[in-house]
Image: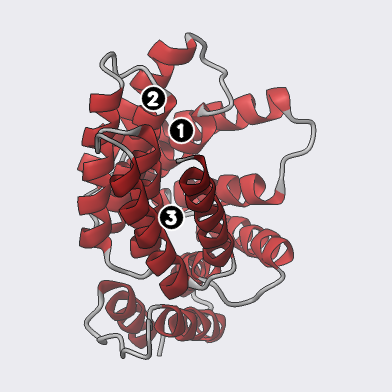
Amino acid sequence: SETRLIMIRSLSAIARVHYDQGQLGLALAEFEQVLSMQEAHFESRENRSIATTLSNIASVVLDLGDIDGAITRFEQVQALAERCYATRSHLQVATAFHNLGFGHALAGRQQEAIRLYQESLEVKGRLFRTESHPSLPPTLMRLGVALCETGHADLGEEHICRAEQILYASNAVLAPATRAHLEVAKAAHAASLSKWTGAVGHLETALELIEARTGSESNLEIAAVQARLGRALLESGDMARSRQVLSQALTTRRAQLQVNGKHVSESHPWVAELTSTLAAAQ
């Protein structure tokens, strides 16, 4: 039994490394193998480790561009986490709401995303009983972006500023990844007010931070920021740079969304959206 647990943990760690390296197809296969081993090992499927593995699978599926498939898995994680913790006051429950909200945001269902982010913050509030816990900023920033993108710029800015205050209260210097997320959130607020020059500045900073952290100029996180930057440049009237940045984002997304040599349909929402924006920049 102990040997099997060690094997499960080891394979899960290997899958995590492959996921962080961008080897999504391999990571997905390994996480699914971990899930199969866990289901055979544990007496009940209502297990916290199984919920964690399901969440990892959902994250990989999302990065592979299957938004609906990821949402289905995140819903399974949410239901499982709530059954594992009867009071619902646990970080795994809050994280499940946060991830599910992000999935709906990517699918364009911002109102549902807002509801789920608020659920996540409510659980964290009951759990930590403080308004400055370090787990709050990621959800506050996501909620702020969703509010800005649904016409609530003032309320969105309030959440983004609150996240920034919490972050700097406990960190003299923010980690590059955290700074990048904050810059993207600020860009969303600027864009909601049609302050396109400001949005461009925030997104360019975010892009520099991500590229420096990853040592790469081509991954899905970079492509997502490039897509926002390309649209902001388009709105600001810089058509040439907009075309350049959007083309880079489109190339990255097409490459990253191919698994096992399968061609990604041009109708895929992440590809179609960029293609349409690029056409507008011509």
Q: What element carries label 2?
A: helix
Is 42 located above or below residue 181 in the figure?
Answer: above
For label 1, the residue is 140
Q: Residue at x 24, y 38 (%)?
A: 45
Q: Distance between the residues labelled 3 and 1?
A: 22 Å
Please say which color scheme the image uses.
Answer: secondary structure
Label 2–label 1 contact, CB within 8 A? yes
Label 2–label 3 contact, CB within 8 A? no
Residue 59 in sight from this viewpoint: no
Quarter of the picture containing the C terminus is: bottom left
Dot placed on the residue nearer the N-terminal end, 2 or 1 = 2
In the rendering, at what x and y percent does residue 43 appear?
27, 35
User: As drawn, which residue projects farthest toward the top?
Assistant: 129
User: As drawn, which residue projects farthest toward the right?
Assistant: 172
Q: Nearer the viewer, mark 2 or mark 1?
A: 2
Dot placed on the residue nearer the N-terminal end, 2 or 3 = 2
Dot placed on the residue nearer the N-terminal end, 3 or 1 = 1
Give the residue type at disc 3: Ser
Give the residue type at disc 1: Leu
Of residues 255 and 233, the one drawn nearer to the viewer in this rendering: 255
For label 2, the residue is 121
